[in-house]
Image (spheres, rainbow, N blue to C red):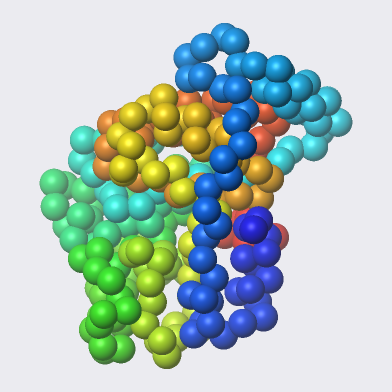
Amino acid sequence: MQALALAAIFMLCPVTALWEYAAPEADTREAGYTAGSDSRGQQEDEAGSDSRSQAEDGIKKRVALTFDDGPDAQYTPVLLDGLKERGVKASFFVIGANIEKDGNRGLIKRMHEEGHLIGNHTYRHVDLSNLSMEDAHRELQMTDLLITEITGEEPMLVRPPFGKFPQGLEEPDKLYVKWTVDSRDWVMKNTEEIVRKVVTDTEENDIILMHDCYDTSVEAALQIIDVLQEKGYEFVTADQLLME
């Protein structure tokens, strides 16, 4: 299901119904791509030809690159450097407890100043469906307060850990965001495999799930950007993809 379909769900369904939606299983089709290789197969060549035609027509296919579980003092700065070099804006769903350690407040400030979207991923990365309404609300509120204190803006988007949310908890000023492409980077921890999976699975209007707390994920993310940009994709923040 494409991310624009998610936008329709957000507009038409109450928050309590959103979590009946589940991200689809990864598509198993092969794109003939090998990270770091100049030979990407006939199908990849055809896709590149299509993207060049789109680029000539001024048409860009939009996708959103999102990162969970940060900020990370070691790897998030490397990712931010790479995004800045490429002129790409991403979406970061951050954990409150991680903001408060390792001097990571400065990373949140940098994300904001460089135009990235900052979303709420709870304070302790807990399964909200196992909490009371009061405790679940507190998890979101604590992280909201930290982000607002640093950036001056309260986050509008929430990604609950594991995609689980307690029935009945409604935050009327929030959008709850899942994903349509799961990189499985936290499982594979292999740059080449992550790149191959994401490049193969991604289509227009997809929301890509990654993490900025692994070196392999950060390296893969930058390679993914390079490959998808060559194929005619434009990277936007999750709110742009869902609301425009």
Tell which residue pokes out farthest to the left in this image: 102
Corner quadrant of residue 1: bottom right
Q: Nearer the viewer, residue 61 or 88?
A: 61
Q: Residue at x 71, y 17 (%)?
A: 42
Query: Residue 77: x, y in percent?
Result: 30, 35
53 up-or-down from 5: above or below: above
Q: How many marks?
A: 0
Query: Residue 212: x, y in percent?
Result: 33, 42
Q: Nearer the viewer, residue 243 or 106?
A: 243
* Residue 54 appears anywhere in the view: yes
181 up-or-down from 54: above or below: below
Looking at the image, residue 22 sits to the left or right of residue 185; the answer is right
Looking at the image, residue 193 sits to the left or right of residue 3; the answer is left
Corner quadrant of residue 217: top left
Query: Residue 95: x, y in percent?
Result: 27, 59
Q: Quadrant of the C terminus?
A: bottom right
Query: Residue 200: x, y in percent?
Result: 58, 34
Looking at the image, residue 19 sits to the left or right of residue 92; the answer is right
Tell which residue pokes out farthest to the front in this image: 28
Q: Residue at x 33, y 64 (%)?
A: 161
Q: Residue at x 42, y 29 (%)?
A: 193
11 up-or-down from 187: above or below: below
Looking at the image, residue 181 sits to the left or right of residue 205; the answer is left
Tell which residue pokes out farthest to the top in this image: 38
109 up-or-down from 52: above or below: below
* Residue 143 appears anywhere in the view: no
Q: Residue at x 26, y 80 (%)?
A: 130
